[in-house]
Every structure is written in C-alpha cells, then in structure tokens.
Image (cartoon, rainbow, N blue to C red):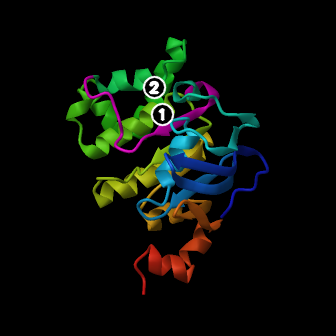
Amino acid sequence: MEKQTNDILLSVRDLNVFYGGIQALHGISLDIRQGEIISIIGANGAGKSTLLKTIAGDKEIGSGSIEFDGRPLPGRIHQFSQQGICLVPEGRKIFVNLTVLENLQVGAYAQKSKAVIAQRVEEVFDLFPRLKERAKQMSGTLSGGEQQMLAVGRALMAAPKLMMLDEPSLGLAPIIIDEMFEKFRQINKMHGTTMLIVEQNAQLALETADTGYILNLGKIQLKGPGSELLDDPYIQEAYLGFK
C-alpha cells in the first residue's frame, strides 16, 4: 500500500549520465516522497547502480537535475550525511581494521554530542543484537551478513532522512536476506526513514516497496506500486522466473 504523503523528498528530472561517449541513463525522472520505500530493479547493466552513484554525487550529471528536500544536492558525497542522506554501498565498504563500535561511531562523525552518539549506538544494537555481542570485535572478522548489518547500522548513526542501499542482498544467504529486508521495513516504520533500494532480488524488492521502478538499458520501463508490479505478467516472466 502506498503511503499517503505529498512531501517530495527527492526529485530527479530528465537525468542523463554518460561514461565517456556511452550514455548510461536516458532521461530518468522520479519522485520519492517522505516515508516511502522505493525499489529499483533491473538486469545487470540496466543503470541501477549508476543512478544511485549519481544521486550520491559519485558520478557526474550529464544533464538534468536532482533536488533533495527542495534544494539542489551538494556536489560531493562526503557532504551528504550532513544533508540527511546516507548510502550503504554495494559490498558494504566497512572499515575492516576498526571494531564494530568504532565503525558505528564513525557513522556519527558529524554529531558532536557524546550522549546522542551513545543513544544512537544503543538503538542500532537494539535493532541488530548480534552487533552488540560483537561490539569489540574487529569488523573484518564478521560474517557477510553481520558486515551488512554493520553497514546499515553505520548509516543509521547519521539519522538520515534518506537511506540508499545498493544491492543489499549481494552475497548473503537467503535467511539473512529475508532478515535484512525485514529490518528495512522496521527502520522505515520506526524512524520514518525514506529508503531507496537498488536490488536484483526482484521478489523481495517489490514486496518491500511502496513504489517500484523497472530500469532497462538506462531507461524507466515500468513504474507502479510494488504489489501491482508483482502481479504484472511481464515482470513475473522477466524478473521472477514465472512462465
């Protein structure tokens, strides 16, 4: 069911992005409303990660515009957490030579209050009890699933308005994938965090999403409520393996 809100948090208009002379995104336009979960699915090479990297300031815009909370986005990714945006990148990218607790504290680097940081750490530990058990453990020794929990927890430490997740199920066991997507729903419900999920697991992505987008060769092919896209015969055959 789509959440009823008119507050547009992120607006992308006629976005074109190039790699050298090759166009990767063609006229992408989308709106993300406050409190929504948006999933973007598509085959390898469809442009999903390019879209996230461009929104995150890690890829130059060829033409078009991106606005967050009614203002143009800052130019560089390191400024984004101060604006209320956090990216959980593909492959987690945690600091393997820091402990779990130290990784979380890094996520709150812009917050000066030690009391607020401590409170956020406890909130992450409540959400992911396994991280509390491993608070003093070096992060490089965690399992893949635990590292994904840590990457999400580190993003939460910045109290983002928008959390972007790039292929969060990549390399994880099915039971951990189900657990992570349940946590995404919980974060969205408890904190009101808007979420933009780029994901190859079409079934889970659309089950979780208020709105889903299908990218194909750098263009938006379909858009609609996640539940309706799940029932679309084309989606079922092309992405869900139904005949």
Q: Residues within 10 Å of mark 1 (few under 14, many from 20)?
A: many
Q: Farthest residue toward the front?
A: 21
Q: Helix, strand or loop at disc 2? A: helix
Q: Which mark is residue 165?
A: none
Is residue 126 shown to the viewer in this render?
no
- The answer to whether 182 is drawn above or below residue 229 in the figure is above
Q: Amino acid at mark 1?
A: Ala
Q: Give the number of callouts.
A: 2
Q: Residue at x 25, y 23 (%)?
A: 97
Left or right: 61 in relation to 154: right
Q: Which residues are magenta?
A: 81-97
Residue 219: percent from left, percent from top: 59, 62
- Is 89 covered by the magenta stretch? yes
At x 45% / y 57%, what residue is drawn? 199
- In the rendered image, which quarter contains the N terminus? bottom right
| Residue bearing mark 2 | 107
Discs 1, 2 touching: Cβ within 8 Å: yes
According to the image, label 1 marks what residue? Answer: 155
Compute the Cα span from label 1 to label 2. 6 Å
The vertical placement of 109 against 147, above or below, is above
Give the residue type that dot 2 points to. Answer: Gly
Of residue 65 and residue 130, the one placed in the foreground of this image is: 65
Quadrant of the image containing the C terminus: bottom left
Give the residue at x 49% y 26%. Answer: 120
How many residues crowd mark 2 within 10 Å: few (<14), some (14–19), many (20+)?
Answer: many
x%, y% of residue 215?
Answer: 54, 63
Query: Which residue is found at the position 27% from the left and 28% from the top?
Result: 96
Describe residue 124's horizontal placement relative to residue 142 as left or right.
right
Residue 95 lies in magenta, yes or no?
yes
Report if residue 40 is visible in the image: yes
| Lower position in the chain sequence, tag 1 or tag 2 | 2
- Whole-percent x, y for residue 115 in the image: 52, 15
